[in-house]
Image (cartoon, grey):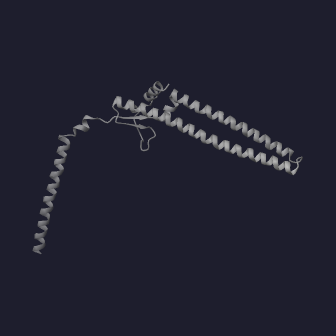
Amino acid sequence: NEMVWLMSQDYFRRLGGLMKSLACLFLGVLTVVFFFPAVPAAAQAVKIGVVDLQKFQKNSKSFQKASLSVKKKFDDMQQKLNDERNALAKLDEEFKKQSMMLSLDAQEDKKRELEKKQRHFKFMYDDFTQEMKETEMDAVKKIMKELEKIVEKIAEKEGYTIILERRTLGLLYFNNAIDMTDRVTDAYDKQYP
């Protein structure tokens, strides 16, 4: 029993010494943090900005011009597709009206011609769809590269640490004072009229 008591005394003495050591270490860290703050962190404040791309798209005159250009190309292609669709519908209507009066060979010829036109229309539709996707993607890439240059120039000039897009994943709130969309839009429209 006396042996256990001596061992427990030794254990608590060691534990007490360990606790004193940890307490001293903790106080030493606190002293360093409070009395000698990190100079580089204090010298360089973090400056954050936010750009709202939807607002930029809505307000930028240059973006609107580019958008109209893409829309005009789309409308021209859509008109060609509509013309082709109307011609196809007319051909189908004629085939249905004439099918009773035509011989079996003539019906087969008309049917093959109609199927050929339908395949051509589908090819044309797929081709136009792909071309429009590429046109839109190219326009977006071009604008985003130009916008990135503008944002980078403003960030370097005004000392921003980071500039985020408004809909960035994880950005739940920001004060409107750091919204720089209007400045970016004005700079973009001046640089790319």
Where is residue 173? Give x, y as percent.
41, 39
Quadrant of the image occupied by residue 82: top right
Q: Nearer the viewer, residue 167 or 122?
A: 122
> Looking at the image, which residue is at 85% across and 44% down?
97
Visible residue check, residue 78:
yes
- Location of residue 185 with respect to 173 vertically, above or below: above
Q: Nearer the viewer, residue 27 or 8?
A: 27
Q: Is residue 90 left or right of residue 153?
A: right
Where is residue 60? Give x, y as percent.
50, 28
Q: Nearer the viewer, residue 24 or 67?
A: 67
Count of labels in the image = 0
Where is residue 77? Give x, y as percent.
65, 36
Q: Nearer the viewer, residue 147 or 77?
A: 77
Q: Is residue 162 left or right of residue 88?
A: left
Extreme residue in the right direction: 101
- Location of residue 88 with respect to 20 vertically, above or below: above
Image quadrant where one finds the N terminus: bottom left
> Looking at the image, which residue is at 22% across and 40% down?
38
Where is residue 148? Give x, y as percent.
43, 34
Visible residue check, residue 179:
no
> Looking at the image, which residue is at 77% across and 41% down?
89
Q: Is residue 45 left or right of residue 27?
A: right
